[in-house]
Amino acid sequence: MTFDELQLHDTLLRAVKAEGYTTPTPIQAKAIPHALLGKDILGVAQTGTGKTAAFALPILQRLSAKAPAGGHRPIRCLVLTPTRELAGQVGESFMTYGKNLPLKHAVIFGGVGQAAQVQSLQRGLDVLVATPGRLLDLMDQGYVSLRSLEVFVLDEADRMLDMGFIHDVRKVIKALPAKRQTLFFSATMPPEIVDLSRNLLTDPVRVEVTPVSSTAETVAQQVYFVEREQKRGLLTHLLKDGKISRALVFTRTKHGANRVAKQLEGSGVTAAAIHGNKSQNARERALDEFRSGTLRVLVATDIAARGIDIDGLSFVINYDLPNVPEQYVHRIGRTGRAGATGTAVSFCDGEERAYLRDIERTIRRSVPVVEDHPYRSGMAP
Ligand code: AMP
């Protein structure tokens, strides 16, 4: 499945490609076609699955199909999220994917002054992303009308419940027009959330994606404790082992990916970097060369590596540890596929110890430490 098969307009496809996405994630592939037809969706999915684009893309497409002719813009889409961080991220997604469209959005949440938020509401907008408390507050003050609402998104419904917001959510729902499309997302479905979804949704399409919290048994995991400035030496040291015919190396940043690739080239290892700033052509070329064995090392950021499938990849190296544990699971899932065995090596410096703890909690196991290497933290090489 490619994005081109999803019946999305060119403007949205361009924005998606500019982000470096090559293939829709499972929730996107399953939800977007139904959402585009105006169906209600029950999405059982957690953060990290690409659920934001799964609702933002079809919403942008449907809203832009009949943009208001001018005058005051009524709010046509409301996205309710439990936290200001998530509200900010969702707002950014609407901005990124909708950058070629004449639609406006705003993000409102509590804990900050309301003046700027009121101003953007008064200027008019198409998509409002909000946390429940501040939204109710501004509704009570008469700044928000949801009369013209066409689409309602409830994001992370189970967290709304955990955080004690469910009462506020119900109040907001009372103010929504009965005729609307509703997209409902929750990572888990406790009984109260099942009830809420039944009340909110009409003949929904249920889309469920399994959380990525377990790592394959076929992947041997190892961690090397190493000072940040010694990582480069450790990588070269590991690659001296002829058994590593090919390795996919992950870095957290685009800049880091470029630097590592350059350093490897400098020490005689064929390598290239792929990330969102590289053209599609450059990325495809690097991938082809890596697949054919011309390149021994491919250095990638998480986003660039999404959806890439490389047969027979037996080595993944986390040059930096990801700060989102699920990314670790995604990364190491590149190896040990289809029953083959693989090795996932992680470099961990002093500042990354907390990330390692989060990862171990998520995968519910501890990652074996390799003690015997010349770049061990606190030891001279
Ligand atoms: P979400 O689950 O919506 O929080 O998304 C998780 C991350 O995946 C975000 O950083 C997105 O930018 C990224 N993402 C979403 N869809 C795709 C895709 N099709 N390919 C690659 N990355 C994606």
Image (cartoon, grey):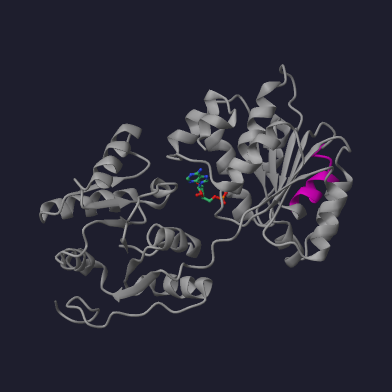
User: How far across and how far down the image is residue 146, in percent?
Assistant: 82, 37
Q: Please report the bounds of the magenta region as a residue range.
A: 134-145
The reply to whether residue 116 is visible in this rendering is no
The question of residue 81 being in magenta is answered with no
Image: 74 above or below 372: above
Residue 348, image x and y in percent? 33, 71
- One can see residue 127 in this view: yes
User: Looking at this view, is 119 or 131 the one in front?
Assistant: 131
Kindly identify the residue that appears in the image at 70 percent across and 47 percent down. 130
Measured as percent of width and height from the top left, residue 355 is found at 44, 70
183 or 132, nearer to the observer: 183
Residue at 63% x, 50% y: name it: 87
Q: Quadrant of the C terminus?
A: bottom left
Q: Is residue 219 left or right of residue 261?
A: right
Q: Is residue 112 left or right of residue 268?
A: right
The x, y position of residue 176, in whole percent, is: 85, 41
**Which residue is at a point 71% across and 30% down the rendered structure image?**
124
Q: Relative to residue 52, is residue 244 drawn left or right?
A: left
Is residue 356 placed above or below 101 in the rendered structure? below
